[in-house]
Image (tube, rainbow, N blue to C red):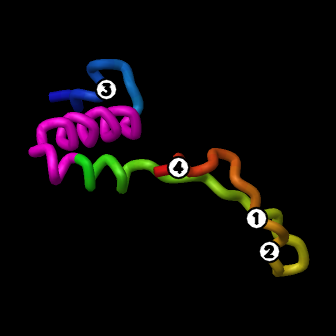
């Protein structure tokens, strides 16, 4: 039996994101809000040179609450 994500023609990461969103949406209101807040995150990168990290910059800044 093939994996459901392979049968649908999507990557495992996309499949996991869809499943996580479905679980978050099925939670009760008070718990759902906390779960959705944990889901929001920013993406930072830093260039490393000679074993030391340079300045960190946001690629995707975190959403303001």
Q: Which residues are magenta?
A: 12-32
Question: Which of label 3 and label 4 is nearer to you?
Answer: 4
Give coordinates of residue 37: x percent, y percent.
Answer: 36, 52
Determine the CA span between mark 1 and mark 2: 8 Å
Q: Is residue 35 magenta?
A: no
Q: Is residue 62 above or below residue 11?
A: below
| Residue matched to label 3 | 6
Q: Nearer the viewer, residue 6 or 45?
A: 45
Q: Are marks 1 and 2 in contact (CB under 8 Å)?
A: yes
Give coordinates of residue 41: x percent, y percent.
Answer: 49, 52
Give coordinates of residue 63: x percent, y percent.
Answer: 53, 47
Provide the secondary structure element on which disc 2 rests. strand
Of callouts 3 and 4, the N-terminal one:
3
Provide the secondary structure element on which disc 3 rests. helix
| Residue matched to label 1 | 56
Q: Are marks 2 and 4 in contact (CB under 8 Å)?
A: no
Question: Which of label 1 and label 3 is nearer to you?
Answer: 1
Horizontal side, residue 47 vs residue 65: left or right: right
């Amino acid at each position: 039996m093939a994996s459901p994500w392979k049968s649908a023609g999507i990557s495992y990461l996309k499949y996991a994101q869809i499943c996580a969103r479905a679980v978050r949406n099925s939670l009760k209101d008070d718990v759902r809000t906390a779960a959705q807040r944990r889901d929001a995150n920013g993406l930072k990168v830093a260039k490393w040179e000679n074993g030391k990290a340079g300045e960190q910059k946001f690629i995707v800044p975190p959403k303001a609450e």
